[in-house]
Amino acid sequence: MYITYIIIGFTCVVSFLAFNDRHLFVKLQHWPYEEKRTGEHFRWLTGGLLHANWMHLIFNMVTLYFFGIGVEGWFRSHFPEMGVTLYLLFYLAAIVAASSATYFKYKDSPSFASVGASGAVAAVLFAAILLHPTGEIYFIFLPIPIKSFIFGILYLWYSAYEAKQARDNIDHTAHYYGALFGFFAPLILEPSLFPSFISEITDWFQSF
């Protein structure tokens, strides 16, 4: 059984409980200002288990389902004895990496708090892009395929731009750094992935 399914199930359970318990929601959400004041840095992790609403939860979990299975499969095939453990650590570390980025940006902003697995899901998505950069990704409301590495470039540009603008309640900083973590973390385990990444993109351009 893929541990991706367990991650999805556990995240859904915690999110559902928090939907119906405001105290639990506030206690577990990623709130940099409160974390700085109380030292409750466990929120860096628990915030990734909560979601603002059902649509937020469904979008993240569907994305994790479609890309997580493939990424977990890579971990399993390349590290037979500990691939599942490494994949789980990769996912949890991605939540923490994304949350820590927003912590240092918003630790003096009492009004900022965030929830959601988006940073970790972005990490899984960018790991998938690293593994197969010329695969195709479809936008939900626009059924036109786009090469995954092109999507990745656009995603990073958009996330960086919106993070700088800070004009909505979406944690674009977590998306950006989660994506970067997801791309570079597998390279630490398997540096040969980068030449393969470049080669696949080069071959695609040369096919025209």
Image (spheres, rainbow, N blue to C red):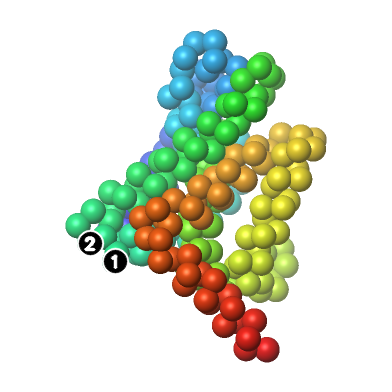
Cβ atoms under marks 2 and 1 closer than 8 Å: yes
Q: Residue furthest bottom?
A: 208
User: What residue lies at 47% left-to-right and 14% top-to-bottom?
Assistant: 39
Q: Is residue 42 above or below residue 146?
A: above
Which image quarter holds the C terminus?
Answer: bottom right
Q: Is residue 40 left or right of 52 when viewed as pictured?
A: left
Q: Amino acid at mark 1?
A: Ser
Question: 13 and 189: which one is in front?
Answer: 189
Q: Few, some or many C-alpha atoms within 10 Å of disc 2 (few <14, some 14-19, many ≥20)?
A: few
Q: Position of residue 83 (x, y in %)?
A: 28, 56
SS assignment at label 2: loop
Alpha carbon distance from label 2 to label 1: 6 Å
- Quadrant showing the N terminus: bottom left
Residue under the image location 75 percent in, 43 percent down: 162
Residue 26 percent across, percent down from the top left: 54, 21
Name the residue that disc number 1 marks.
77
> In the image, is 102 to the left or to the right of 42?
right
Q: Measuring from the top left, give residue 24's x and y in whole percent.
A: 48, 22
Q: Provide the secondary structure element on which disc 1 rests.
A: helix
Residue 74 location, quadrant: bottom left
Q: Position of residue 94 (x, y in %)?
A: 47, 43
Q: Nearer the viewer, residue 204 or 50?
A: 204
Residue type beneath disc 2? Pro
Q: From the viewer's side, name the closer residue of 106 and 207.
A: 207
Tell me the crowding category of disc 1: few under 14, some 14 to 19, or many 20 or more residues within 10 angstroms, Cα based: few
The residue under the point 63% across, 86% down is 206
183 lies above or below 136: above
Give the answer, above or below, for where 61 lies relative to 169. below
Comparing 52 with 203, the one in front is 203
- Mark identifier at residue 80: 2
- Asked if residue 92 shows in the view, the reply is yes
